[in-house]
Amino acid sequence: MGNIAPTLDTAITNGHVVTETAINEVDVGILNGKIMSIASPGTLTADATTVIDAAGSLVLPGFIDSHVHVNLELGEYTTTDSMVDLTRAAAHGGISTVLPFAIPNQGERPLDALARRRDEAAGDAYVDYSFHGCLTEATESNLDQIPELIERGAASIKAFMVYEDRLMLNDGDLRAVMGRTADAGGTMLIHAEDNAIIDHLVEKHRKQGDTTYTAHGDTHPPVSEAAAMWTVSELVSESGCPTLLVHASTKGTKAIVAKGEREDLPLAVETCPHYLTLTSDVYDRDDGERFICSPPVRSSEHRDALREMVASSLIDIVNSDHCGYTTAQKRDNRDDITQMPNGLPGVETTAPLLFSDGVVDGSLSIHQFVRLMSTNVAKLFGLYPSKGTLTVGSDADIVLFDSDAEWTIDARSLHMATDYSPFDGRTVTGRVETVLVRGETVLDGELVGNPSVGEYRSRDSETAQKQYRTL
Ligand code: URP
Ligand code: ZN
Ligand code: ZN
């Protein structure tokens, strides 16, 4: 009797498979990059070419980071990570899909920025990727490109209310972009801070000769975020444009979420690990410039309020806002808040930080963790259920996670293109062990994949719009 040919490429056995709603002791069978079967323990191994023993691990849907910056040029600085660097670090953090921004260079067409980003990324990604479109100038020509950006799979458009002279849209321009995006069936992501409030305070500090990094928090007060978020909520109400408020940093977010619920607005909120785990004391440190980001890290009152909002599902997703600079770049202009580069590296550390400070400390269920890191992100950006869950037919984007491993974050053993982590020295529980991207193992204790594994994902705006209300 001849051997029966395997019908699965891979079977993952002996693990606890966790989705946004369930946890089961089952085997997962993978064929051609997709989940082909989910079955009782031990029943799939004989059919598989490769068997992965997940004993003692959680088997989770691959995480998705929809807020990462690659080659961001702002002022005199450019972020340090190439697409290869970013996706290598992402894989180590269990992130199987990233969504960077196609930010136009000065004068560049948004469609050309998207094409350029796609060219740069092709063959240079360890994990899957897609791009957000971005408008930094609301000219008629740029506004006319919104439908095509969306058709080409950049179904979400990013806008900044700050970074004057480079990225910022004023309220009138933002309103125009949101209106066109809504009409074209897209969604938006908005950096909401009130530039006029910030400008006024920066000017005041400049006159006082006090522009060192310690002034950063003072020049970006909580009200600057609340005021801008309120404006956005009114523009969402008028346009109906599904919108994600990125990197929420203040307790004031709660009032905006309540307004969104009251008025049934398609408004979602993201926060980041630095707002959940750090406090503004970091700006009193000698190396405080390494923590400069916008909005800034806040007092414990804001941190605790954000943690509560995450625990009660008022905040929908947790992303890194990865934006890597080196210590030298951060130090360069530490005495000039108008010049210093804003942003923190973090794509690799989001999952262990949120697991540790959420699931391990008892404030989040494991299903909430999955929703915040994967399911809700997939839903907001038109990737669900192909990504964001583990079900028959989904992409086999899978993380094996050791929920007991205790380790201390140390930039020297991380993989981002920088020499520090804002979380250096923090001991966390939970570690990514193995990562599969569409069935291909890219991480198995160490990097085993290559940068041709990651594929571009065109995203469908209709799916995203519908799923906005199913979070
Ligand atoms: O400080 C930050 N967050 N830098 C990255 C760009 C942005 O605003 O998201
Ligand atoms: Zn931002
Ligand atoms: Zn950002």
Image (cartoon, rainbow, N blue to C red):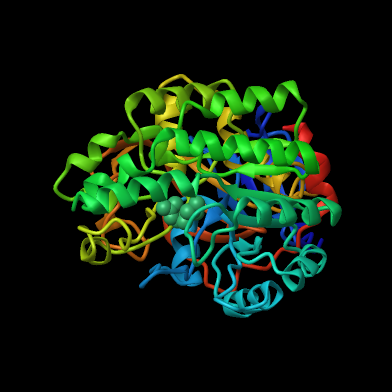
Q: From the viewer's perspective, is residue 277 above or below residue 393?
A: above
Q: From the viewer's perspective, is residue 335 above or below residue 468?
A: below
Where, quadrant-wise, is the N terminus in this rendering?
A: bottom right
The answer, for residue 292, to whether it is visible in the render is no
Residue 415: % across, % down = 36, 61
Identify the residue at horizontal 29%, vertical 36% (top origin).
Answer: 280
Q: Depth check: give the residue in front, 134 or 430.
A: 134
Q: Is residue 374 left or right of residue 305?
A: right
Count of numbered tags = 0
Residue positioned most to the left: 286
Q: From the viewer's perspective, is residue 273 above or below residue 259?
A: below
Identify the residue at horizontal 52%, vertical 72% (top origin).
Answer: 450
Q: Is residue 344 left or right of residue 248?
A: left
Residue 440: % across, % down = 61, 62
Please tell me in which quarter of the rendered image ligand 1 is found.
bottom left
Residue 153: % across, % down = 76, 64
Q: Depth check: give the residue in front, 361 or 211.
A: 211
Residue 301: % across, % down = 37, 23
Identify the residue at horizontal 60%, vertical 69% (top origin).
Answer: 453
Q: From the viewer's perspective, is residue 353 above or below residue 90?
A: above
Q: Is residue 26 left or right of residue 345?
A: right
Quarter of the image holding residue 150? bottom right
Where, quadrant-wise, is the C terminus in this rendering?
A: top right
The answer, for residue 178, to whether it is visible in the render is yes
Q: Is residue 276 left or right of residue 13?
A: left
